[in-house]
Image (cartoon, rainbow, N blue to C red):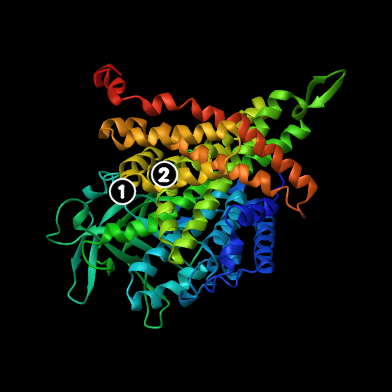
Amino acid sequence: MVFNPATQEQRFVLDHVAAIGELAATETFAAASDDLIDAVLDGIGRQAAGEWALLTRLGDTIGARWTPDGVTMPAGYRDAYQNYVAGGWGTIGVAEAHGGQGLPFVIQTAVLETLGTADLALALCPILTLGAIEALSHHGSTEQQAKYLPHLATGAWTGTMNLTESQAGSDVGALRTSAHPRGDGTYLITGSKIFISFGDHDLADNIIHLVLARTPGAPEGTRGISLFLVPKYRLAPDGTPGEHNDVRVASIEHKLGLHASPTCVLSFGDNGDCIGELIGPEGAGMRAMFTMMNNARLNVGLQGVQAAEAATQKAADYARERVQGYRGNSAVPIIEHPDVRRMLMRMKAQTQAARALVYYAAAQVDRANLGDHSARMRLGALTPLAKAHATDIGCEVGNLCIQVHGGMGYVEETGATQFFRDVRVAAIYEGTNGIQAADLVGRKLLLDQGATIQSLIDDMRSEAENSALVELINACETVTTRLLGAHDDDRLAASYPFLTMLATATCGWLMERQFRAADEPGCDPAFRATKQATALFYLQQIVPEALGLMAAAMAPAEMLYAVPAENF
């Protein structure tokens, strides 16, 4: 497969969905000129196609390896990552005060999309680092920011988040890792964490772990959790990595996919000598960690776009080459058969819809950072949609890639399974998609008695022209009204179908907007034809499907409990 960066599509979505021109007109983002955006998209496309994409099959077949001295990555990965660092790509969206370029988050999103489409596993490393930067930027001390942020901004040092323990998954409040004061302002960290992505590797010179732990006498549950900065190597007086900090990688997981992303079991303080620094006040760990997680959830949604784009390109390449069957009297490539066209059109439409949803949400991050309160509220509602729906789409499109390949799709040597295997976890980590749906109806809907979601519905209705889209928007409003007055179990029973309905309506709104924008002067004719055909497919075939979910979204929870647990 030859990887082709989706540069033209990205630029179109930045212009017409993210409204990047509005952001560039502000003093904060004045550097985001048209020429700069084009240079960024072109440059990262060349690097991704020329280096990262060449590693992805190697990463899948060989993967990261555990050794007693730590995790080693496949050949070529360190060089590719160091070239990413040298190119300054990690600094795109980081504030200038912390060593970054201060460009909009949505441009950083486009950069990460390109990298992740080329190699989904490797691109997870900078995503995690950006989360650490976000937490330190908002909650770290001035000294911590000065010591760590410039190195994290470039990617010379990488970051992790350490929440999960064997007995504390979604129930973070059950964690047992402890932090005991040493008397000098630092703490001794003791405990273990599981499922730590890029918890160890040989790509960079230091790894900065952000670790949730309890201090002595802290309250039970989440109120007693604090956040600590625990480097793999302590800093020497000159600020460079020095002696090892008693952080050990006990093992790495053997997984369905993402083989080049080491998922580690980390043990802190086996020798009683793991030193951490408190980030923010004691007991405020969850607030700081959610700062990391909110933008991280958008970036996980972006992983759905990455996998979907790569799978669509792979399937289309195969369908153009694989000659099988006849149309008329001639043997034809399978792309000429209607059912294969159906699958490819669905893949393309769903990928473009997911990209529009994630970029639209990312642009709300920038507007919120400019002080727009309504954008901050909308971002809260969009985040569970972007995380859950885009990763659902990634899984669907990855599955269709296998189907387009037929029997060869089930054979590992074709590489058709990798996209589905890699993206499947994205529907699970950073809060399962079911948790995202629960967040939508349990927190985001009730926070302001539905006003934020109603505002989104009103905006969609004011622009929508397609009859199926209008019907779906109206159905979302009907379900919203019902859920506002429903009991908790009924809201939660309706949460997933409602999330899918609302996300599909939002995608349909943004796809219809792109259909109209493609008619504007200057749009490349071939691009216009493809964009409009894809948008129409989405509006005419995918939007109506979501209307079928209304029955489930309106049903009470009673039916779900009609079968006793022991009878399942």
Q: Residue furthest right?
A: 329
Q: Give left or right: position of 185 versus 397.
A: left
Amino acid residing under circle 1? Leu
Mark 2 residue element: helix
Closer to the eye: label 2 or 1: 2
Q: Does 366 appear above or below 239?
A: above
Q: Residue furthest left?
A: 217
Looking at the image, tell me whether mark 2 or mark 1 is earlier in sequence order: 1
Q: Residue furthest bottom?
A: 238
Badge 2 local density, few (<14 within 10 Å), some, or many (20+)? some
Q: Residue at x 25, y 21 (%)?
A: 565
Q: Which residue is mark 1?
A: 447
**Residue 67's spot in the image, x, y percent?**
44, 54
**Residue 98's spot in the image, x, y percent?**
46, 75
Q: Does 417 appear above or below 6?
A: above
Pointer 2 and pointer 1: residues touching (CB < 8 Å)?
Answer: no
The picture quadrant where one finds residue 46 is bottom right
